[in-house]
Image (tube, rainbow, N blue to C red):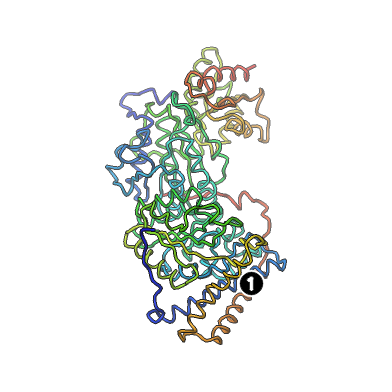
Amino acid sequence: MTQTMGAKAEPPVEAEHAGLQEMMAQLVLVREFETKCAELYKAGEHMVGEYHLSLGQEAISVGTCAGVRQADLVCPSIRGMGIYLCRGTPLDFLTTTFFDHVGGIGGGRWAHWHSPDPEHGILAQTGMLGSGLVTSVGVALSQKHLRTGKIVVSMLGDGATNVGYVHEGLNFAAFADLPVVFIIENNQYAVSTPISSVTKTENLSARAQGYGMPGVTIDGNDVLLVKATVSEAAERARRGKGPSLIECVTYRHSGSTVKDPDKLRPQAEKDAALRQCPVQRFKTLLIERGLLTDKDYERLVAKTHQRIDEAVRVGKSREPFKPSADPLKEYWPYAEGVSQ
Amino acid sequence: MSDTMQLTNERTLTFRDAINEAIRQEMARDERVILMGEDVGLKGGIAGVSRGLLEEFGKDRVIDTPISEMAIAGACCGAAMTGLRPIGEFYYSDMLMFMADNVVTSGARLHFATGMTAPYVLRGRDGSKPGDGGPHQDSFAAWFAHIPGLKVVMPATPQDAKGLMTAAIRDDNPVIFLEQIPLYGTKGHVPEGEHVVPLGKADIKRAGTDVTLACVGRCVHDALAASERWAKKGISVEVLDLRSLRPLDVEAIRKSVGKTGRLVVTHEGWGSYGIGAEVIASVCDGPELLLRSPAQRVGTVETHIPSSPILARACLPNGERIDAAIAASMR
């Protein structure tokens, strides 16, 4: 890696305490929300979709959202539920969809982990890995062209980095100096296949050099480092200096999806990853700095559980979808509008 | 045909310049319209369609891209989702296959799934290009016409090319705009000012009473030539230019076949699961029986097109094959 962004984790004393507390709350929210969803699925509750859990990777969502402005646009990876949670998508909007009920995200038309939530600046996902990346490049193109002052965050897993789209998309963003930050959530596995077994480069961020953009590999479980690095890349993009590539190294605590029994990854590796838990690390940091007590943390978890339980209750209580009597009319795929 | 008959004082343009004029007028009318693709700027496009646009609108709106069809398709989709009305150029219809995933799984699905709109046009050269052979003379219109949420158009005349391009740019959906290579140099009358041909409307290029010859793209010209030959034998052929493949103008097709009772369809691209199959099905599906003789398809024969132009001719739709199909329908 010849170009780095040189971001340092900012000392907590210099940051606003409220911001730190908010990040703690978001880490807990993502952790507890996904844990609950996995439990519901395992308990045999009717839940649609291949929920791609981000347990263990929460610092990336939380740090990224903290590192950009709320008006900026984020195109999450398929493991991106944390982005929805951190950007304020109502919890019952998500749970309603899990139960296949009316009134949730996607409206039964698009899987919850691909559904845009434009109100919260979440766009451009698709189940075709890499395809969403080039779409997000287009989103960045329009931000530049329309001079919105917004930047785009385009996220992908390590598995998706080997899709041909990524080569075209990174090069396109670079040559056109687009305001975009690419974030690789490197949890080290594409379902069952270790990234190291299919990719020779040690740091995926080294690829940035080939596109003439800065690239850096960071500890993706350090939420403050993620925030600082993303923030620096975002402001660079906002100044018209073009894209950056940030590789956040992490490890997922569960299978690839709720349906994945996860029997192939070595136990020792999983145990080691738990010791690097991003939620516990940040909690310990805040306690050491005197900004949090164990009691505060317990209260936070309890409060979060209440929110989640309420969202689950609301989601469950909503009406199931009814098959349409006239699906062509109801699901007509064309916009009727014509530019005036 | 009417477009090549130059009436006094009628302004004529080539097919190429007619598309250029539509894009230029729309770019002047609406700042959200941008053009991107390989060689669209300095060179003015591989087929010369975008000549002069870089000079007129600047490099922010006429973007020379790397050879990256997947990125061009994605950039068009993403930019269209967020406020622009992009036009993306591909070199050949074959390169549309690189674009296929993004436009099918993202662009075509967007409105259905989210209520958002993706107003963009993917346009470029399509179909046979005598002498170029290999994978550079296929027509994949039917692949894209298969997809709900996409619109697919293929003009045959300069006038329709301008009108359909204008409509495609203004449409709030992704549109695949296919320009058949032999047509670029053909000339015809083109209205000077704003000219819109609605998407999804077929056009009777020559009225007739005995057999409907539905056609699209460069095959419209083969169909018109065939209609001349058959007129001399006392057979009146109605040449119905489909113009749009999705939406397909089923009403116009059924109306014509209701009158003639006979149907021949000719187009580039393979016949099986193809445009002809769909046109014939649209006639057979209807409430009443319209055909009084077996319908005929004249597409590309069911093999790959040889690179030699001499060999290729026998595989593509041509006058002999159209005549044989008309003869079969008249038996």
The reply to whether residue A179 is visible in this rendering is no
Instruction: Name the residue at 46% across, 86% down.
Output: A290
Quarter of the rendering containing residue A143:
bottom left
In the depicted view, which residue is nearer to us: A180 or A254?
A254
The residue lying at 62 percent from left, 71 percent from top is A35
Q: Quadrant of the N terminus of chain B?
A: top left
Residue B46 image offset from top left, x and y in percent: 37, 34
Left or right of B133, for residue A209: left
Which sits in the foreground, B330 or A38? A38
- Where residue B109 sits: x, y (%)? 55, 50
The answer to whether any part of residue B85 appears in the image is: yes
Q: Nearer the viewer, residue A331 or B231?
A: A331
Image: A211 above or below A288? above
Which residue is situated farthest in the right direction here? A44
Task: Reply above or below: A221 against B303.
Answer: below
Residue furthest left as drawn: B55
Residue A139 appears left or right of B245? left
- Taking depth in this image into account, of A261 and A87 the one nearest to the observer is A261
Output the chain of dot 1: A
Q: Quadrant of residue B184?
A: top left
Displayed quadrant of residue A53: bottom right
| Other-residue count near label 1 (Cα within 10 Å), few / some / many at <14 / 14–19 / ≥20 | some
Count up the numbered dots: 1
Q: Amino acid at mark 1?
A: Lys
The x, y position of residue B136, in whole percent, is: 47, 31
* Position in image of residue A243 (x %, y %): 38, 57
Check the image and report above or below for B160 versus B263.
below
From the image, tell me which residue sits under label 1: A36
